[in-house]
Amino acid sequence: MDCPSEEQMIRMKLEPLSQVKHLEFDIPARKLEVFHQDEVLPIQNAISELNLNDQLQSTTEAEMPIAEDETKHKKILWWVLGINFGFFVAEMTTGWISRSMGLIADSLDMLADSIVYGLSLFAVGAAISRKKKVAKISGYFQMALALLGFSEVLRRFFTQSETPLFQWMIIVSLLALAGNLISLWLINKAKSKEAHMQASAIFTSNDIIVNAGVILAGVLVYWLESKWPDLIVGGIVFAFVMRGAIRILRLAK
């Protein structure tokens, strides 16, 4: 598992199985511990249907672990969701003003994170059918935005277009970088071993890399006096957004 959407896929797949009592994810190590009753085969078959290259390591008797305080985690995730969605709006707006595809793509990456965090927060206690419906709508919406972004990148590649305003690219990306650093600090401060918190830390770390890429593109736009660095970075980030949309749509299956 390398993102929260894969964790959600597994949770939604196993939720109908009454024998599953508790799940413990180790995102970095790509491991999952399932605390269950009765036979393990139905659980193994359900996970295998997700095509995540799973492999059963072992099964043994174990005590149910003590759950962490979810109230604190939810409060942190609400803050992270707010930061991500706020910068989605800010980067989308300034991206169009400055003609920067890098900023627009980064804004959609922020939106993708907001969608996953929103699914994690709003889907608690909801029916499976509702979760899948929300995931499907979110995934198609994100995919549509990514396709529009790709088409705009291609249009600017093959037509005459103005060089983006590098000042906006650098300043706004620096602010987004600061926002993601604050998010990562909040997540790490919780010192949680819960999967959704680990996955959130990975997501936010990836966002920091994207922010740095847009800042570098802004510097190169200034240095080379060319639109190409912005378009290249924008295309790369749109590819990540499209991959995220596909993973979210897999939640709806």
Image (spheres, rainbow, N blue to C red):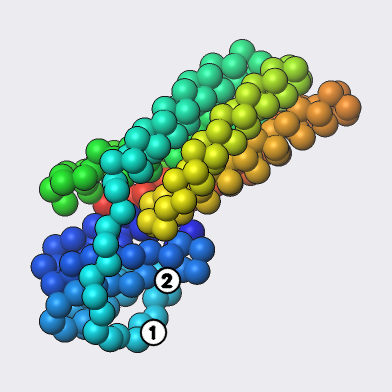
- Image point 88% across, 28% down: which residue? 224
Foreground of the two, 202 or 52:
202
Mark 2: amino acid: Lys
User: In which quadrant of the rendered image does the C terminus lie?
Assistant: bottom left
The answer to whether 231 is drawn above or below residue 2 in the figure is: above
- Image point 46% across, 51% down: which residue? 191
The answer to whether 147 is drawn above or below residue 249 in the figure is: above
Give the left or right position of residue 77, taking residue 43 as reference: right
Quadrant hosting residue 103: top right
Q: Which residue is mark 2?
A: 31
From where the camera sits, is residue 46 visible? Answer: no
From where the camera sits, is residue 93 visible? Answer: yes
- Image point 39% across, 76% down: which residue? 54
Quadrant hosting residue 211: top right
Mark 1: amino acid: Gln
Q: Dot 1 surroundings within 10 Å: few (below 14), some, or many (20 or more)?
A: few
Q: Could you tell me which secondary element the residue under label 2 belongs to?
A: strand
Foreground of the two, 213 or 227:
213
Q: Which mark is residue 57?
A: 1
The answer to whether 69 is drawn above or below residue 84 in the figure is: below
Give the percent coordinates (x, y) of residue 179. Answer: 56, 29
Give the percent coordinates (x, y) of residue 230. Answer: 72, 31
Q: Dot 2 surroundings within 10 Å: few (below 14), some, or many (20 or more)?
A: some
